[in-house]
Amino acid sequence: MSQNNMTEDEALSALMSYVFSGGLGAPTGKDAGYSLIEATPTSFSWSVALDGGDEASAHADRYRINIDRQSGQITSPGPIAISETEQAQVIALATGQTLTSSTRFLDGARSISYQVTVEENPDTAYLIHLRHGNVASMESLITRLSRTPKAVTEHVLPIPAFFPIPGERERQEITGLGRQISLFVPGVLASRIYPSLPHEDKLVFIQKVALAFAASWSISLSEPILIGGLHATTVGDTIILDVQAERDHGLGGPFPSVREYLESHVKASFRALEKQQGIEEFKQKYLKRIGNFVRTRLHKISPIVENVPIVVLHSNMGPHNIIVSSDEPTTFRAIIGWTFVASEPFLAVHRSVEAYFREPALNGFGPEYDRADELRDAFWGTIPYWRRWGETDAAEVFREWFRFGLFMKPEGRPAGLPAAASRAFWSENVRVVEDFLNRYE
């Protein structure tokens, strides 16, 4: 590769300049959402949408934009969508049924979706997704998860049924975007109801969350165990798991050790801190100090962290990825979001688990619910094997370094906050960074 080729950061900067100069229409008062679809030695491919402003809707149009890494040339945006004709074709291929209706459904960070009905069974609905995660790998992985003993005998890992589209793996290798069909599961996202549940219902809920996490953590990984994104391949009746580079947070890898994983986690967090906008006051106070530490002190990660178990984990199993019954909010109907699956130390789910103990907040770290200590005790008490691991010295050291990475980059603080709220907005970031640096500098 030529040394003059654009880096991902340079390409992203060019992309945002294009978008906010009117490449997708008038940008005034709108935000740009984006995610990387594909990176090759010659180009980057992005999914981009403008959302907000007077024309805000539930489903902002998404576009695919390619950037040539050598010339910097940007292609004309192409819509990311599935036509109704194409939807009818894939429904027929995967289910043998006839499409009768289609409406846009909820969009994910890396997907758009349509809810469809069929002529042969009007009471059944399907979701057709267009994703830029590896669809074939995801379906193989879901099949493997559904075979875990607790998923089979205790139904602690409810996953929507999927209907593979013949030839889709080969098609996605060409297009970069994969189509996927799943059974529509009626219900409500837990993120909408969990914060207002009575404490006793939260206790029941959190125990089920713990069992779901533990079910995937029990899956065996082949030696040598690596850390990174998890990929699955079906060969006959066997599903083979292998570990590849971590894409969700740009860590790279795969990593042969927990220390190398933590080093990359901290470095990636520092890069994000450098690029974060709207936190100049925080940067002025901490950027240089944190940067000096990251460049010179990562050797202080203790080898003891190698004792922390590496597991199969859903790295985004917060309330927003659990569907519950509309009538019985502690009854789980489905766990979704399986594009975010990794081979990582089990404590890397810190932020997802913490979401069940704290109120939602713009800074990502809201005040604790009343009696949050009982919620934590219920979670870890339900899975005592993992609780014992979480109480080891290795786990404590891992948590220190991992939380340092999580909290070194605060969220942008909204303008116009009262003085007390303004101080509180970054208080946990400041506390974690100060305590950590005072200990390890």
Image (spheres, rainbow, N blue to C red):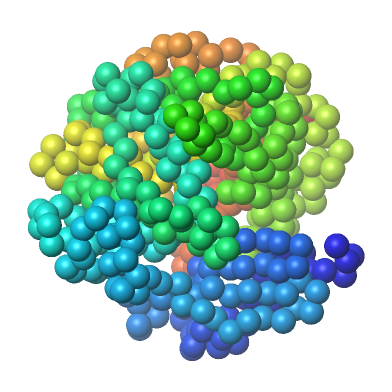
- From what the image shows, is residue 319 above or below residue 83? above
Quarter placement of the C terminus = top right
Q: How many marks?
A: 0
155 left or right of 46? left
Decide if residue 84 is on the left or right side of residue 148.
Answer: left
Residue found at the far right of this picture:
3
Measuring from the top left, give residue 268's x and y in whole percent: 70, 47
Q: Is residue 341 visible?
A: yes
Quarter of the image for residue 130 reads: bottom left
Whether 258 is drawn above or below 138: the answer is above
Q: Residue at x 28, y 60 (%)?
A: 91
Q: Residue 79's spot in the image, x, y percent?
A: 46, 77
User: Dividing the image into 4 quarters, which one contains the N terminus?
Assistant: bottom right
Residue 433 shows in the view? no
- Residue at 35% over, 70% down: 86
- Residue 207 percent location from the top left of the image: 30, 24
Vertical placement of residue 151 versus 404, above or below: above
244 vs 87, left or right, is right
Residue that appears at 35% across and 83% down = 54
Instruction: Give how far across and how far down residue 353 sits, in percent.
Output: 43, 33
Q: Which residue is found at the position 67% from the left and 81% from the top?
A: 74
The image shows residue 128, relative to residue 354, as above or below, that is below
Which is nearer the eye, 196 or 134? 134
